[in-house]
Amino acid sequence: MNFLAHLYLSGNDEETRIGGFIADSVKGRDYNDYPTNIKKGILLHRNIDEFTDNHRIVICCRHLLHKPFKKYAGVITDIFFDHFLAANWSVFSKEPLQVYADNTYRILSNNMDMMPDKIREFLPFIIKNNLFVSYECIEGISLVLNRMPNKTSLPNESVEGIKILKDNYNLFRNYFFDFFFEAIQYVEESHQIKLNQDILSS
């Protein structure tokens, strides 16, 4: 899952959402350095990633994207799913996406001091480009894909990635809906047991 999906699945608690946002930049057991609800958000993020990485639908999506992106096919799948979440936001929330994004930018900006350097440095780019709302359009996805090779070892295959998305748009959309409703159910039910186990063992 990418930023918007993780934030959405983190729920309404502000600290849990912060944890969900910064989780990829928190290594090992460093989550123990954070307040309880941020720690919960980090562990929830990790649980969702495990659920996602092993899901049959995500595996199908990775297969479609494997040729140009190889081991990064899962990263591109996450970004595509953020597009479909943003483009169909009203299905999942009564709050307009721009309002949700503005509130989230405020929460994150007010808590930059507790973020790891990597994600703190990326946050201004997110806010400047209104990234969460830009995901609604394929152009917004292109912006992210074009930037990533400059910051990571992701192959510079954004044109091919967007072509695959457009050529298989309805398929990816159906995959997203089937998967995301299951992810919501997982967060509401199954993850809580594992989350409690993770906290007790940390």
Image (cartoon, rainbow, N blue to C red):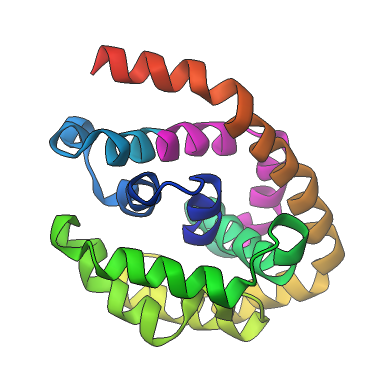
In this orientation, does residue 76 appear? Answer: yes
Residue 52 x/y as whole percent: 58, 38
Left or right, 61 with reference to 69? right
Which residue is at a point 51% across and 46% down the rendered structure image?
A: 11
Question: Residue 14 in the image: x percent, y percent?
Answer: 37, 51
Residue closer to the observer: 75 or 173: 173
Is 85 on the left-hand or right-hand side of 26? right
Residue 143 in the image, given as x and y percentages of width and height: 50, 83
Q: Residue at x 34, y 64 (%)?
A: 107
Q: Is residue 155 visible?
A: no
Q: With respect to residue 48, does 80 lie above or below?
A: below
Q: How many marks?
A: 0
Magenta span: chief secondary structure: helix
Residue in the image at 31% along x and 53% along y:
22
The reply to whether the magenta stretch includes residue 57 is yes
Q: Residue at x 40, y 73 (%)?
A: 148
Q: Looking at the figure, which quarter contains the C terminus?
A: top left
Q: Is residue 47 above or below residue 169?
A: above
Vertical position of residue 26 compared to residue 111: above or below: above
Of 180 and 139, nearer the camera is 180
Considering depth in this image, is 50 or 19 the residue closer to the camera?
Answer: 19
Residue 68 sits in quarter: bottom right
Classify residue 32 by image quadrant.
top left
> What range is drawn magenta here?
44-67
- Estimate the x, y position of residue 128 in percent, counting from the top left: 37, 86
Q: Is 111 inside the magenta-drawn segment?
A: no
